[in-house]
Amino acid sequence: MDVLVKVSGSLTRDKKFYDWLAIIYRFSDNLFIICGGGEQITKVLEDNNISFEFGPQGREIQSLVGKHLALQVLEGERAFVKEKLQKIGIKAVVLIPVVKAGGKIFHINGDSYTLALHLNFDKTYFITKEGRTKSFPENLNKIEVVYL
Protein backbone atom coordinates (compact mmCIF):
# COMPACT_ATOMS: atom_id res chain seq x y z
CA MET A 1 0.00 0.00 0.00
CA ASP A 2 1.31 3.45 -0.95
CA VAL A 3 0.78 5.96 1.86
CA LEU A 4 1.08 9.76 1.88
CA VAL A 5 1.34 11.59 5.22
CA LYS A 6 1.19 15.36 5.61
CA VAL A 7 2.44 16.31 9.07
CA SER A 8 2.04 19.71 10.64
CA GLY A 9 5.39 21.33 11.39
CA SER A 10 4.30 21.67 15.00
CA LEU A 11 4.31 17.85 15.32
CA THR A 12 7.57 16.90 13.61
CA ARG A 13 9.35 16.84 16.96
CA ASP A 14 6.56 15.10 18.86
CA LYS A 15 7.08 11.47 19.95
CA LYS A 16 3.36 10.80 19.42
CA PHE A 17 3.79 11.40 15.69
CA TYR A 18 6.63 8.87 15.39
CA ASP A 19 4.76 6.31 17.50
CA TRP A 20 1.75 6.67 15.19
CA LEU A 21 3.98 6.58 12.09
CA ALA A 22 5.63 3.33 13.21
CA ILE A 23 2.22 1.64 13.14
CA ILE A 24 1.38 3.00 9.68
CA TYR A 25 4.82 2.03 8.39
CA ARG A 26 4.14 -1.65 9.13
CA PHE A 27 1.21 -1.61 6.70
CA SER A 28 2.78 0.44 3.92
CA ASP A 29 4.88 -0.59 0.95
CA ASN A 30 5.89 2.96 0.10
CA LEU A 31 5.71 5.82 2.57
CA PHE A 32 5.88 9.51 1.61
CA ILE A 33 5.84 12.32 4.17
CA ILE A 34 5.22 16.00 3.49
CA CYS A 35 6.52 18.30 6.24
CA GLY A 36 4.76 21.50 7.10
CA GLY A 37 6.42 24.40 8.83
CA GLY A 38 3.59 26.74 9.78
CA GLU A 39 4.36 27.95 13.29
CA GLN A 40 8.13 27.86 12.71
CA ILE A 41 7.85 29.88 9.47
CA THR A 42 5.63 32.45 11.17
CA LYS A 43 8.16 32.86 13.99
CA VAL A 44 11.13 33.29 11.61
CA LEU A 45 9.27 35.84 9.51
CA GLU A 46 8.13 37.79 12.57
CA ASP A 47 11.63 37.67 14.10
CA ASN A 48 12.98 39.20 10.86
CA ASN A 49 10.15 41.76 10.50
CA ILE A 50 9.05 40.28 7.19
CA SER A 51 5.40 40.81 6.35
CA PHE A 52 3.06 38.08 5.21
CA GLU A 53 -0.67 37.53 4.95
CA PHE A 54 -2.93 34.53 5.25
CA GLY A 55 -5.01 34.11 2.13
CA PRO A 56 -7.29 31.34 0.91
CA GLN A 57 -4.28 29.10 0.17
CA GLY A 58 -2.45 29.78 3.41
CA ARG A 59 0.50 32.06 4.13
CA GLU A 60 1.47 34.44 1.33
CA ILE A 61 5.00 35.83 1.40
CA GLN A 62 5.90 38.51 -1.13
CA SER A 63 9.49 39.17 -0.05
CA LEU A 64 12.22 37.12 -1.69
CA VAL A 65 14.12 37.14 1.60
CA GLY A 66 10.99 35.86 3.34
CA LYS A 67 10.58 33.08 0.78
CA HIS A 68 14.19 32.01 1.32
CA LEU A 69 13.74 32.03 5.10
CA ALA A 70 10.58 29.92 4.80
CA LEU A 71 12.46 27.52 2.52
CA GLN A 72 15.25 27.22 5.10
CA VAL A 73 12.71 26.35 7.78
CA LEU A 74 11.11 23.69 5.58
CA GLU A 75 14.47 22.23 4.57
CA GLY A 76 15.41 22.10 8.26
CA GLU A 77 12.17 20.26 9.04
CA ARG A 78 12.83 17.79 6.22
CA ALA A 79 16.39 17.15 7.45
CA PHE A 80 15.17 16.67 11.03
CA VAL A 81 12.45 14.20 9.98
CA LYS A 82 14.78 12.25 7.70
CA GLU A 83 17.35 11.90 10.49
CA LYS A 84 14.69 10.88 13.03
CA LEU A 85 13.26 8.27 10.63
CA GLN A 86 16.71 6.84 10.00
CA LYS A 87 17.30 6.48 13.75
CA ILE A 88 14.05 4.59 14.29
CA GLY A 89 14.32 2.45 11.16
CA ILE A 90 11.52 3.89 9.05
CA LYS A 91 12.17 4.24 5.33
CA ALA A 92 10.27 7.08 3.68
CA VAL A 93 10.57 9.77 1.06
CA VAL A 94 10.37 13.13 2.83
CA LEU A 95 9.09 16.10 0.85
CA ILE A 96 8.43 19.78 1.45
CA PRO A 97 5.71 21.83 -0.26
CA VAL A 98 8.03 23.93 -2.41
CA VAL A 99 8.76 23.96 -6.11
CA LYS A 100 11.90 25.59 -7.49
CA ALA A 101 11.82 26.50 -11.16
CA GLY A 102 13.54 29.10 -13.32
CA GLY A 103 15.44 30.50 -10.37
CA LYS A 104 12.22 31.14 -8.44
CA ILE A 105 10.83 29.61 -5.27
CA PHE A 106 7.16 28.69 -5.26
CA HIS A 107 5.72 27.92 -1.84
CA ILE A 108 2.58 25.81 -1.91
CA ASN A 109 0.25 25.39 1.03
CA GLY A 110 1.10 21.97 2.50
CA ASP A 111 -2.51 20.80 2.53
CA SER A 112 -3.01 21.91 -1.08
CA TYR A 113 0.21 20.18 -2.13
CA THR A 114 -0.92 17.00 -0.43
CA LEU A 115 -4.35 17.14 -2.06
CA ALA A 116 -2.70 17.55 -5.46
CA LEU A 117 -0.74 14.34 -4.89
CA HIS A 118 -3.26 12.22 -2.99
CA LEU A 119 -4.83 10.52 -6.02
CA ASN A 120 -1.54 8.69 -6.55
CA PHE A 121 -1.77 6.99 -3.15
CA ASP A 122 -3.88 4.28 -1.60
CA LYS A 123 -4.25 6.24 1.64
CA THR A 124 -3.52 9.84 2.67
CA TYR A 125 -3.27 11.07 6.25
CA PHE A 126 -3.25 14.65 7.47
CA ILE A 127 -1.61 14.76 10.90
CA THR A 128 -2.35 17.86 12.93
CA LYS A 129 -2.57 19.07 16.50
CA GLU A 130 -5.52 18.28 18.70
CA GLY A 131 -7.91 21.24 18.72
CA ARG A 132 -7.38 22.28 15.11
CA THR A 133 -10.17 21.84 12.60
CA LYS A 134 -9.47 20.11 9.33
CA SER A 135 -12.04 18.61 7.00
CA PHE A 136 -12.30 17.45 3.42
CA PRO A 137 -15.22 16.56 1.15
CA GLU A 138 -16.66 13.10 1.83
CA ASN A 139 -15.91 11.95 -1.73
CA LEU A 140 -12.21 12.07 -0.86
CA ASN A 141 -12.56 8.75 0.95
CA LYS A 142 -8.84 7.88 0.83
CA ILE A 143 -8.13 10.81 3.18
CA GLU A 144 -8.09 10.60 6.97
CA VAL A 145 -7.38 13.36 9.47
CA VAL A 146 -5.48 12.31 12.60
CA TYR A 147 -5.32 14.59 15.63
CA LEU A 148 -2.35 14.12 17.96
Image (cartoon, helix red, strand yellow):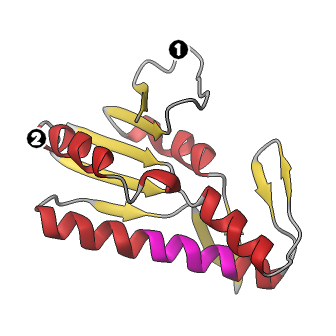
The quarter holding residue 53 reads bottom right
Q: Say above or below: 34 vs 27.
A: below
From the top left corner, tell me how far across and down residue 123 is, in percent.
33, 32
- Is 110 magenta? The answer is no
Q: Which mark is residue 139?
A: 1
Question: What quarter of the picture does the C terminus occupy?
Answer: top left
- Disc nearest the viewer among 2 and 1: 2
Q: Amino acid at mark 1?
A: Asn
CA separation in Å, label 2 and label 1: 27 Å
Q: Main secondary structure of the magenta part?
A: helix
Q: Secondary structure at mark 2?
A: helix
Residue found 47% across the figure and 76% down from its top? 76
Residue found 59% across the figure and 67% down from its top? 98
The quarter holding residue 136 reads top right
The answer to whether residue 102 shows anywhere in this view is: no
Q: Is residue 90 left or right of residue 134?
A: left
Circles 2 and 1 in contact, beta carbons < 8 Å: no
Q: Secondary structure at mark 1?
A: loop
* Magenta residue span: 69-77
- Which of the pair 19/35 is nearer the observer? 19
Q: Which residue is mark 2?
A: 26
Question: What quarter of the picture does the N terminus occupy?
Answer: top left
Q: Is residue 106 left or right of residue 114?
A: right
Q: Say above or below: 14 vs 141.
A: below
